[in-house]
Image (tube, grey):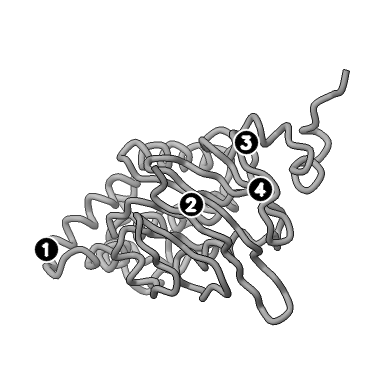
Amino acid sequence: MPILKTEKLTKKFGGLVAVKNIDFEVNEKEIVGIIGANGAGKTTLFNCISGNLKTTSGKVIFDNKDITGHKPYEIAELGLARTFQVVRPFANKSVLYNVTVGAFLRTNQKSEAIEKAKEIINFLNLSSKTEVLAKNLTLPERKRLELARALATSPVLLMLDEVMAGLRPAEIQDMLKIIEKINKKGIAIVIIEHIMQVIMSVSNRIYCMNFGEKIASGTPQEITKDKNVIKAYLGDEYGIPEN
């Protein structure tokens, strides 16, 4: 059953159509990948779903509720959280402070929010950095902090926008394990990622976008064989030789 779906979702910036008539859905407890070249409309789609951008037309349905036009905080309260390509912590505040802010979405009690934050920090292997200022973290640690802040809101669906960008191979493997652990908790995940080995290994289904349009969707195996995807994004090395 879909926890999230869009219907003919469109976003225009003047004469530029950044997202065009996108029908998209994510089932409960599923991991869905989104691929496409830079400028394909992936992050714009995320921004429309999460309320960071107002849609031009179409609908966003989350947990059987029409959330089209809702504010980001209203959508977060319903259980949809997201990360950003460029991490945005409170740079001069501690890791604990940053994550506690997210936890306050579900409680007004400071002690409960701190307890929840510490639980998330431990889950993401950041316990040794609890009192470190966000600006003093390494890139992999800042990525995990961004993820921790989203998780602290107790989402049922988590949208990840290039959370592995800039990471080294070993760090990518660590992040993959974290994503799989999150999913095992019953949280559905949508992930934008350019690292094909990552997106192919972790996703149940994949959507490919090109110039604002959905050009294909299917399992990783189906996507790697799709001629439109190969031509627009994957390249000939993913092509299936003809007999």
Q: Is mark 1 on a helix, strand or loop?
A: helix
Quadrant into which the C terminus falls:
top right
Q: What element carries label 4?
A: strand
Q: Could you tell me residue 110's position as x and y percent?
A: 13, 68
* As drawn, 101 above or below 28: below
Q: What residue type is labelled 3?
A: Gln
- Rounded to the nearest angstrom, the CA distance separating label 3 from label 2 is 19 Å
For mark 1, does the 10 Å Cα neighbourhood hold few (<14), some (14 to 19), or many (20 or more) residues? few
Residue at which label 1 appears = 111
* As drawn, 108 above or below 1: below
Q: Could you tell me residue 97's position as x and y percent?
A: 27, 67
For mark 3, does the 10 Å Cα neighbourhood hold few (<14), some (14 to 19), or many (20 or more) residues? few
- Rounded to the nearest angstrom, the CA distance separating label 1 from label 4 is 43 Å
Numbered tag placed on residue 197 in the rendering: 3
Mark 1 or 4, nearer chain start: 1
Q: What residue type is labelled 4?
A: Cys
Q: Nearer the viewer, mark 1 or mark 4?
A: 4
Numbered tag placed on residue 140 in the rendering: 2
Q: Which amino acid does label 2 sit on?
A: Pro
Q: Nearer the viewer, mark 2 or mark 1?
A: 1
